[in-house]
Amino acid sequence: MSDKAFASSADLAEKEQTLELLADGVYALTAEGDPNVGAIEGGDFLVCFEAMATPVAARRWLAQLREHTDKPVRYLVLSHYHAVRVLGASAFGAGTIVTHEKTRELIAERGRADWESEYARMPRLFQEPSSIPGLTWPTATFTDRFTIDLGGGRGDLMLQYCGRGHTEGDIVAWLPAQKILFAGDLVEAQAALYTGDAFHRDWAGGTLDRVAALGAEKLVGGRGAVARGADACAAAIGQTRHFLDVMLADVGAVHARGGTLSEAFAAAHGALVDRYGRWPIFEHCMPFNTSRLWDELSGIERPRIWTAQRDREVWDELQG
Ligand SMILES: [Zn+2]
């Protein structure tokens, strides 16, 4: 049996939230490695980026945002389907909830299982879980690009698909005039990657190339600190790619020689722990990451659905 507590189930210490103003009317809320959220002011409305895990958690964020602006939330943009990003959506009263088309399909296919899985993995993020009214459904979807005219001389907000990565349907939110990027979980700055639903090869290749090509000068990743300056943005993207490249090399080598999943886990963990082991959710993520990459290398095209039961089985096999 596992001598490490399952996933993040023992991570119960409250994280400190920090509201950062990135430019006039552009906000990010970071929280020491907990999922980041953001907001962008239009002329007479707001666009919110990510919804947190429950309406109660979201209302805490909105209360902080309301100290700066009372504009109504016209758009809620969700970068991907994961429960801790989407289940707080009802708190925003948004006119339109925007995701990638694939995200809508993934919510239909596995939203319920993902909710149960993530709740067991990260219970602290689910403040008052009974406040969740049900799955979150987008009311507008797109495949390549969705442009929001912010009005009031504030330019455009571009929602863009960059290819398969952290999931099958991640999108980023890009402010070209201010060169500010909300990258969702496609980029992590000083936080470990979760790749349990990922497409490692696509993500480490063309997808991150397209993210990098935007030329961000401020970058809000899925977790961790805001990267400020072109060098810091490039470093965050580079760290994300490095993590993926190491996983691909080490898990790939064990897979190629006909080794076992446990050996692959030990190899990848050993190769990454010195650099990333102290960062949030590293131990939590590695079993799920290795399992998914093993499947990917075995020719399983789409990630298998994580259920609370499968989570425990993989955890006990690799972290036990
Ligand atoms: Zn995610």
Image (cartoon, helix red, strand yellow):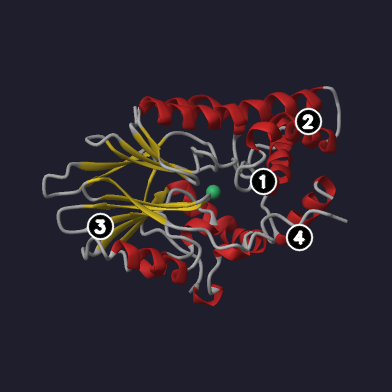
Within-10-Å neighbours for mark 1: few <14, some 14–19, many 20+: some
Picture residue at 78% right of the left edge, 37% below the top: 265
SS class, disc 1: helix
Identify residue for label 4.
309
Q: Are marks 1 and 2 in contact (CB under 8 Å)?
A: no
Category of crowding for the residue at label 3, using alpha-carbon neighbours closer than 10 angstroms: few (below 14), some (14–19), many (at least 20): many
Q: Is mark 1 within 8 Å of ligand 1?
A: no
Q: Is residue 150 above or below residue 253?
A: below
Check disc 3 and report its element: helix, strand or loop: strand
Q: Residue furthest left?
A: 152
Real-space CA distance between mark 2 and mark 3, rounded to the nearest whole angstrom? 46 Å
Circle 3 residue:
46
- The quadrant of the image that shows the N terminus is bottom right
**Residue 112, visible in the rendered structure:** no
Q: Nearer the viewer, mark 4 or mark 1?
A: 1
- Residue 303 shown left or right of residue 75 in the figure: right
**128 up-or-down from 267: above or below:** below
Identified by mark 1, the residue type is Cys
Q: CA distance from mark 4 to mark 1?
A: 16 Å
The span from disc 3 to disc 1 (Cα, nearest Å) is 33 Å
